[in-house]
Amino acid sequence: MPVSYRHIIYIHFPYLAASRIQRASGQKESGQRESGADLPLVIIWKVNGADIILAGCTKAAAHGLAAGMRLADARALCPQLRTEAYDPLADHADLHHLALWARRYSPLTAVDDQHCGIWIDIAGAEHLFGGVRSLLADCAKRLHRSHFRAVLAAAPNCGAAWAFAHYGKPSERLMTAPKPADGQPDTVRYIFSRARLRRHLAALPLAALRIDTAIADHMRRAGLRVIGDIIGLARAPLAARFGQDVLLRLDQALGDQDESFTAVSPPKPLYICRQFAEPIGAADDIKAMIQQLASETATLLQQAGLATRRLRLGWQLVDGLVFAHDVHLSRPSRDVTLFHRLLANASDKINPEFGLEMGWMESLDCSPLAPLDTALPHMMLQRHDGVAGESYASLVDRLVARLGYGAVVRLAPQACWQPEAAQSFELPDPSQMFTKTDEKSGWLGDPASGTAPPRPIRLLAYPHPVDVVALLPDHPPAQFIWRRRIHKIIHATGPERIAPAWWQAPAGSRTRDYFRLRDDQGAGFWLYREGLPERHETPSWFLHGFFA
């Protein structure tokens, strides 16, 4: 007889952790792959002082390395091996995001942290995708397109779906997803009748019941190797010898014992909405709506213990058109005064036409805590209610609100000797601005110290080629021509030699010798010679900056 109407999908990601680490090591900011990135990778975890393999990549699997193997034994099979520590928080975050993504198929999804997979209960939702088979095919196709290596299985209960996803054989597949490159073991299996369920489960190893490894080894020594060996045995002696958990897992896999999971829930949106009985269009009414939404949003954030970095103001016109305006904050905040100040001119963005039927405000990019503001000592403002300090963050927020998101940036130091790459533009972060705790600041030396190499007050966007006259090839310039104007040099200091980063510089990059020059008009220049005469290289001269 058929089992009760329930369809459980289990998606197993055997290479999730390894893929994440490989992507991180292969996509560095410098564009250079990390050393050993192409070696077989295994994820290890210490158990009783011994390093045990928890997972690996496809290359490690090709060398015969499997979960549960000792690292010493693995190195005997594959001496060139890359190891990484197990990061359960990162794995859970990845699985949680995948479970939220899987809500496109059903609102009931859950994370299986212990075995690196997710559950999906699609009962009542499969017809929306043309049946279970079509749903599985669509899920497998989307995962493959996103470069996720996964094994999918569908069964009437959680235990059977888990068993087939981990231990099912290719001959048992009723439907196979498009096979990805590199031999990706993507499989889709669907078991739907009780007789067929028992027949397929009977051929699987006892580990497919999700029992402890020690118990499975004990049962194997007793001559019990597959699930079919225990299905017909007396239950009382089996429980007395191997524990009650064996019977529980067996009943769950066969569908005799109900099993459920706690579904993940998406983040609750922090959303305030106001609908109007009559459309509003007056400027004062729109401003009052914005102020009220901002006040209620700040109260909602306060109750939730959160702070936001982005506010989205939305409105709907009487003709059904919907518009939105985002306000970005430089640091998380829930200050109602700040919200009112940033949204003071938001009404100018709204064209009410024949009126607004609805308005709302949503808080995005929320976090539990907000850093404290640092007051500007030189910007203390005297007001009728006392002395108030304006923070760096508030200043940045006001500039962003006026100029637009992305228009306000700051220069951040980079650990690179090449002048054009020694800094980068970043969005302002008040928690790091005007502090001396930046990891990359100070690597060149304190500018106030005598040992720090001087740098021009203005650096050109790109070096300008110049014509130089020098007494000898390795001497500083006696004069140079830039923009058809001759500059006669009366004082020169240098050279300061800067070599390219050999591990990431493009082919053909040459060493530079920088000179600080002063012409007869008192102007200061920063020139460099590219190419070394002692290496018999033809030198080229460039102007790169100006000194005061």
Image (cartoon, rainbow, N blue to C red):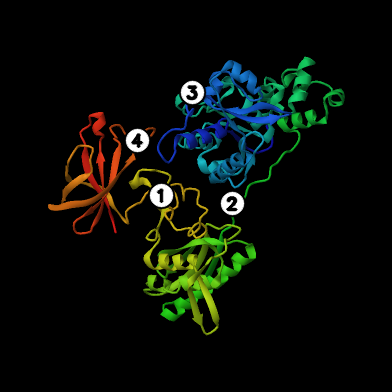
Q: Label 4 vs label 2: CA separation? A: 45 Å
Mark 2 — residue?
266
- Residue, disc 4: 505
Along the horizontal axis of the image, is 481 left or right of 201?
A: left
Q: Earlier in the sequence, mark 1 or mark 4?
A: 1
Q: Residues within 10 Å of mark 1 (few under 14, many from 20)?
A: few
Nearer to the camera, 272 or 234: 272
Kind of residue at badge 1? Ala
Q: Earlier in the sequence, mark 4 or mark 2?
A: 2
SS at circle 1: loop
Q: In the drawing, does residue 479 fall left or right of residue 288?
A: left
**Dot placed on the residue nearer the N-terminal end, 2 or 3:** 3
Foreground mark, 4 or 3, reads 4
Residue 504 appears in view: yes
Who is closer to the viewer here, 30 or 469? 469
Q: Which residue is mark 1?
A: 452
Q: Which residue is mark 3?
A: 183
Of the two numbered discs 4 and 3 on the same chain, state the one appearing first in sequence: 3
Describe the element under mark 3 as helix, strand or loop.
Answer: helix
For the point 45% across and 58% down, the residue is 428
